[in-house]
Amino acid sequence: MFQNIVHYGLHFVVIVVIAYLYWPKQWKKAYLILLATMLVDLDHLWAVPIFDSGRCSIGFHTFHSYPAIAIYILGVIFVKHRALRLICIGLLFHMFTDEVDCLWSTYG
């Protein structure tokens, strides 16, 4: 139960802070962009089974793969467009959140 609260708190609450710190004058727009990065979970739809409570998303699903994460990192470093960089930040934070969940599930 507490693991779910932390997981979804990171996904929905902490990104408000990220949005405000990244783009204070347009934090609501930034929050919506960060929320949209959760569409990265669409890659769960082509997994069999779609949901497996014991499976870690990181390294398994296409958009949660290490090459994809490398692209998100490169985007944060090299992309100059503010909104596109925020998308990469959101994707990386999503990966961080999912990794926390993986570690929690593995090591309790």
Image (cartoon, grey):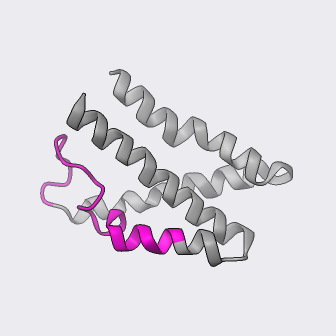
In terms of image quadrants, where is residue 106?
Answer: top left
Q: Nearer the viewer, residue 71 or 50?
A: 71
- 28 relative to 9 in the view: left or right: right
Q: Nearer the viewer, residue 78 or 8?
A: 78
Q: Quadrant of the C terminus?
A: top left
Question: Which x, y percent locates residue 19?
Answer: 70, 48
Q: Which residue range is magenta in the image?
A: 48-73
* Residue in view at x 32 percent, y 67 percent: 65
Question: Which x, y percent locates residue 52?
Answer: 17, 46
* Residue in view at x 30 percent, y 69 percent: 62
- 22 relative to 90 in the view: left or right: right
* Residue in view at x 61 percent, y 44 percent: 15
In terms of image quadrants, where is residue 81?
Answer: bottom right
In terms of image quadrants, where is residue 61?
Answer: bottom left
State yes or no: residue 38 in magenta: no
Q: Quadrant of the N terminus?
A: top left
Q: Can residue 37 be spotted in the picture?
A: no
Q: Can residue 12 be spotted in the picture?
A: yes
Question: Which x, y percent locates residue 38?
Answer: 47, 55
Q: Is residue 95 above or below residue 13?
A: below
List the single residue furthest toward the top: 1
Q: Nearer the viewer, residue 104 or 86?
A: 104
- 90 relative to 103 in the view: left or right: right
Question: Which x, y percent locates residue 25?
Answer: 86, 51
